[in-house]
Each structure stands twice: as C-alpha cells, then as structure tokens.
Amino acid sequence: MPQVSIITPCYNSSEFLEETIQSVLHQNFTDWEWIITDDKSSDNSVEIIKKHQDSRIILIKAEKNGGAGHARNLSLEKATGRYITFLDADDYWQPDFLQEMISFMQSEKAELAYCNYARCDEHLQPKIADFEADIEVNFDNLLKTCRLSLLASMYDSERVGKEFFPEGSKREDHVMWLNLLKKIPYGKPLKKTLAKYRMREGSVSRNKTNIMKDQYLVYKEHMNFSTLKSLYYTANWAFNGFKKYSKIFN
C-alpha cells in the first residue's frame, strides 16, 4: 500500500500532459500511486500515459465523458494511499512537493494542509504573484473564497475518510473542500511554493462571470443556505476572486 494517492482527471490534455507526468516522476518522495482517469479523450492523451511503463501509474478509462468530478471520483474509488492529493493534467509540481507536504502534515499532525503555488502562463513562466498559504482555513472562511487549490493541497484519508466530489457542478472542488471542513476544525498552511498553476485563458476556473450561477448553487443547493445567505456568500466569492487574480492586488 503506497503512502500517497495522486488523483488526476484527464481530458484532451496532450498539450501539457508530458510536463505534468515528468513533474510526478521526478518527485524525490517515491512511495506513491498515481491514478489517472481519462474522461473519453479524443486526442492522444491515453497514448502519452501508456508510454510510461511505471507500475505506480494506474490508468482508468471512463466509459463515458462525465466531467472532472466524475473522473476524480473514479480515481478516488481505487485509491489505497493514506494521503490524498490532486494534480490536474496541465499542472506542475516542484520535485519536493510530496516530501515537503507529507513531512509538514506529520510534524503538525495536520488532517489537511495546503501550500503556496506559482501562478504562471501556459509556458510555466510567472504571470502574477504566487498564491500564498497564509491562514488556517476553516469552513467559515472557505465560504467566502476557496483558498484550497487541488494541486497544492493534501488530506489524511486515514483520519478524515475519502471525500468525493459532487458530479455535475462546475464548482465541485469548492463543495468537496467545504464538506471536508465540516468534519475537521481547520487545514494548516505550509508557506512554501511547491507547485505551478497554469492560468489558461478561457478555463472554467478563470471565467468568473460565467460561473456566478454555479457558485450560487454551491451555497443554495449543496450547503442548503437560504437565498439571501447564498447571495451574500456569492458576492463575497466574486469580490475575493477578483482580488485573487487581478494584477491590481498582486
């Protein structure tokens, strides 16, 4: 049984997939399994994955295109590691990501941890200031802005259990983290930059206007808040999202 399970959804990711694979293969911590679920890609993503003959890489091919949340859930079902972490097929880890995160969680006795990450263009060159893991996250402050990024976070499934994603929501990661933080008091910040996030133009997470309704449903449908309370937190999320990605504040 590996110590860490890495969860990755893959859909038509051939442009950046090889760089992502290399960032995992070059980790200085080696006791991991990497469960990649291909979500019915129409490009050569599967071929890129298959060419790496490493028994720690487990490829699942989804029977239908079900979205990132569905693909992550298929991987989570197969995961056997104590520590769960996530890496999308276009993101990148520094070689010491796993080692630093696990050491931090063990020394701090943390159930959930997150670190700084660099916010880069498509060529992994810095675009705006690094996102900083600067506060302990809890359920209340995570309602106003999602400080937990999948590529820079890790949780202890032995202590909190596996947390699955709601399917069909474009904000499935925020809902998942909120549900996890209902179980524990807080997640701890590791103030080191250990990952790189590609700020790709047109991505779902970058297009704030188009996902305002989806964010509202996080509170209204998934958290069962009143309409007024849901609107209040949606407004907070929108303002904090502007601050998070605007060069005015970076």
Image: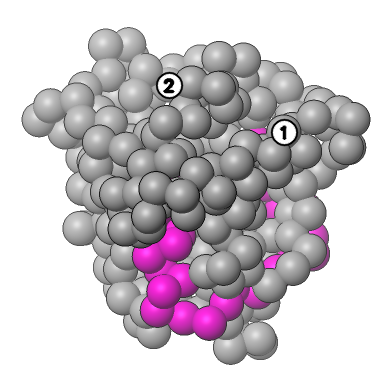
Amino acid tagged 2: Ser
Quarter of the C terminus within the rendering:
top right
In the rendered image of this protein, does residue 207 appear above or below residue 80?
A: above
Q: Residue at x 36, y 42 (%)?
A: 217
Please provide percent x and percent y for residue 68: 33, 35
Residue 242's mark? 1
Magenta span contains residue 178: yes
In the rendered image of this protein, does residue 107 appear above or below residue 157?
A: below
Please provide percent x and percent y for residue 90: 53, 29
Magenta residues, as a range? 173-197
Magenta span contains residue 174: yes
Residue 13's mark? 2
Q: In the image as oriented, which residue stretches furthest toward the front?
A: 228
Q: Residue at x 29, y 24 (%)?
A: 46
Numbered disc 1: secondary structure: helix
Please provide percent x and percent y for residue 204: 49, 25
- Residue 246 falls in which quadrant of the image? top right
Residue 118's mark? none
Q: CA distance from mark 1 to mark 2?
A: 27 Å
Q: Is residue 24 something one can see in this rendering?
A: no
- Residue 84 falls in which quadrant of the image? bottom left
